Amino acid sequence: MPASDTVRIPLPDDRAYDIRIGAGLLDEPASWQGLPKAAAAVIVSNDLVAPMYAQRLRERLLAVYSRVDVVELPDGEQYKDWASLNRVFDHLLAQALDRKTVLFALGGGVVGDMTGFAAATYMRGVPFVQVPTTLLAQVDSSVGGKTAINHPLGKNMLGAFYQPERVIADLDTLDTLPDRELRAGLAEVIKYGPIADADFLGWIEVNLDALLARDKTALAHAVRRSCEIKADVVGQDEKEQGLRAILNFGHTIGHAIESGLGYGEWLHGEAVACGMVLAADLSQRMGLMPAGFTARLRTLIERAGLPVVPPKLGAARYLQLMRVDKKAEAGAIRFVLIEALGRAGLHAVPDALIAETLTAHGAA
Ligand SMILES: NC(=O)c1ccc[n+]([C@@H]2O[C@H](COP(=O)([O-])OP(=O)(O)OC[C@H]3O[C@@H](n4cnc5c(N)ncnc54)[C@H](O)[C@@H]3O)[C@@H](O)[C@H]2O)c1
Ligand SMILES: O=C(O)C(=O)C[C@@H](O)[C@H](O)[C@H](O)COP(=O)(O)O
Ligand SMILES: [Zn+2]
């Protein structure tokens, strides 16, 4: 494994940025050089991650900024809300921090999404840097500029597209990640195979045990290839006018599971994993994929220790939850379906077929 690796995300208007991936990057001075100049930086983290990593990051940042504050949010998906976001604004305003202040998101996707949203809106926009510390955040949420909080009626319903200055993914931070969270991250890694790279799907099947055993070379490849795919998609369609929707494979049902259960009971990656199994089956039922595809994906997802049977919320409730999905149009629920291994697209699916599929998988 090389000491570190860089994937560049191509964006117009001087907004292209680097995703740096490697072991030990947190303590590497070069990770923090060349960022926008400012008097102050604020590390936004949570009460689980900050005690592990915030002081180390703060020491590095003090070589660049004369003032570095730490804001700790409560840990958990159920706190990805207005109240937590306001704690960031309360600190920034109480300390009279100016519009050049740089925010650093230190944590998983919850911290990353909220810090990005705070950066997008504080004084109409301040720079921010993603420092993802979960596998899911390193392969997906820290890249691409989707920022958001949840609403009780729908996942990620309030947010903005706002790109970070840089992403620093230190693979060593994954050493402290609980197994359940590692598996949740693997769900988003698996996602990239069917939607964009059939060879990568085969690679994951072969290397899944090494990934679960936290082999650093395998993890480095998984993070790098995932970021390459996401960077390529986002570079072509930053604001999800079309192509970018493929990154939502498994999320139509996944988000319904998360909001239907009240956020936090199932992890995002778990809900997406189960959602991918049902979306794979819908791809078959719509005649896009041959028999055997769903079984192949389900086997991989089960091997990764992820759920494949949805919670029994009832078909009507699922349909109600999915009607507020951001991909829905004029009341029609649209799914990302697999059209060939490595290729996906958006498809309107009749409610009756969705209900039939949910029932077949035990959701009703
Ligand atoms: N913006 C995007 O493009 C995008 C993409 C995918 C997911 N998301 C969002 O990301 C969120 C899920 O992210 P997540 O899976 O990282 O969840 P998370 O942020 O809740 O982190 C998972 C858990 O791991 C803990 N943790 C973080 N780093 C750790 C470390 N190094 N060691 C030990 N514990 C650590 C966290 O405190 C938390 O308890 C969801 O809200 C989802 O909607 C956004
Ligand atoms: O970056 C994207 O685009 C994605 O869809 C990545 C997803 O993994 C992620 O969960 C995203 O936050 C979902 O976006 P949403 O628009 O459905 O809220
Ligand atoms: Zn996701």
Image (tube, rainbow, N blue to C red):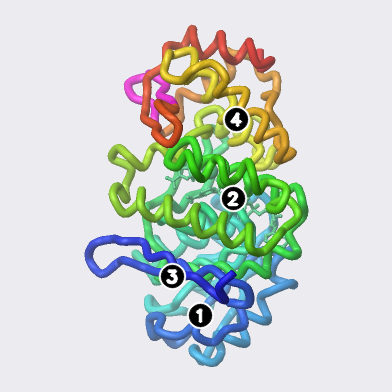
Q: Amino acid at mark 1?
A: Ser
Q: From the top left corner, tell me how far across and down residue 67 is, in percent.
A: 54, 88
Q: Earlier in the sequence, mark 4 or mark 2?
A: 2
Residue 220 in the figure: left or right of residue 303: left
Residue 166, which numbered label? 3
| Residue 91 appears in view | yes
Which stretch appears magenta? Answer: 327-337
Image x and y of residue 39, in percent: 44, 87
Q: Residues within 10 Å of mark 4 (few under 14, many from 20)?
A: many
At label 3, which amino acid type do we have? Arg
Mark before the other along the chain sequence, 4 or 1:
1
In contact (CB < 8 Å): disc 1 and disc 3: no
Q: Is residue 165 above or below residue 315?
A: below
Residue tagged by mark 4? 297
Is 147 on the left-hand or right-hand side of 42?
left
**Which quarter of the figure has residue 255?**
top right
User: Can you give x and y, in whole percent of width and height, for residue 338 in the image?
Assistant: 44, 28
Q: CA distance from mark 2 to mark 1?
A: 27 Å
CA distance separating discs 3 and 4: 33 Å
Residue 336 visible here: no
In the image, is the residue at mark 2 within 8 Å of ligand 1 by its beta carbon? yes
Q: Considering the image in quadrants, where does the N terminus appear?
A: bottom right
Predominant secondary structure, magenta span = loop
Residue to which mark 2 is pinned: 80
